[in-house]
Amino acid sequence: MFSIGTEWVRTWVYKAIRLKKWAENELGAKVIEVYPYAARVTLGMDVKKKTKKGRQIIQKRLPGFIEGSIEDTFLSHDELDAILSAYQK
């Protein structure tokens, strides 16, 4: 178990648990927890994705890990997290 001492963390965690239960029950989805930062470190992309330069570095290194072209688009940090989360095993 983890510590959820502060109110905002407690609220956030319980909201996530409710969302997970809803997705599983109503959509039949399998919900998994991911940690995109770990995938970035594993892939040698330990840079700050909150900055434009950091996102550019990560995006430049992604074509070796995914199919298709992403050179024409500047991805948001959420989109990068989605790609990195899909890579996680």
Image (tube, helix red, strand yellow):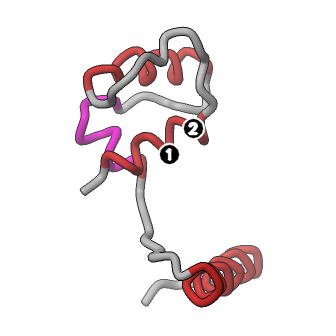
User: Mark 2 = which residue?
Assistant: 79
Front-most of 65 and 53? 65
Which disc is residue 32 wearing? none
- Residue 13 visible from this viewpoint: no
Q: Is residue 89 above or below residue 79?
A: below
What residue is shown at x 60% (from left), y 79% (from top)?
27
Q: Is residue 25 above or below residue 61?
A: below
- x%, y% of residue 60? 40, 15
Kindly report the distance in space between the C-alpha atoms of the residues bearing marks 2 and 1: 5 Å
What residue is shown at x 43% (from left), y 90% (from top)?
1
- x%, y% of residue 48? 50, 30
User: Mark 1 = which residue?
Assistant: 82
Boundaries of the magenta span: 37-45
Which structural element holds mark 1? helix
Front-most of 27 and 62? 27
Q: Are marks 2 and 1 in contact (CB under 8 Å)?
A: yes
Amino acid type shown at disc 2 = Glu
Other-residue count near label 1 (Cα within 10 Å), few / some / many at <14 / 14–19 / ≥20: few
Left or right placement of residue 56 versus residue 64 in this view: right
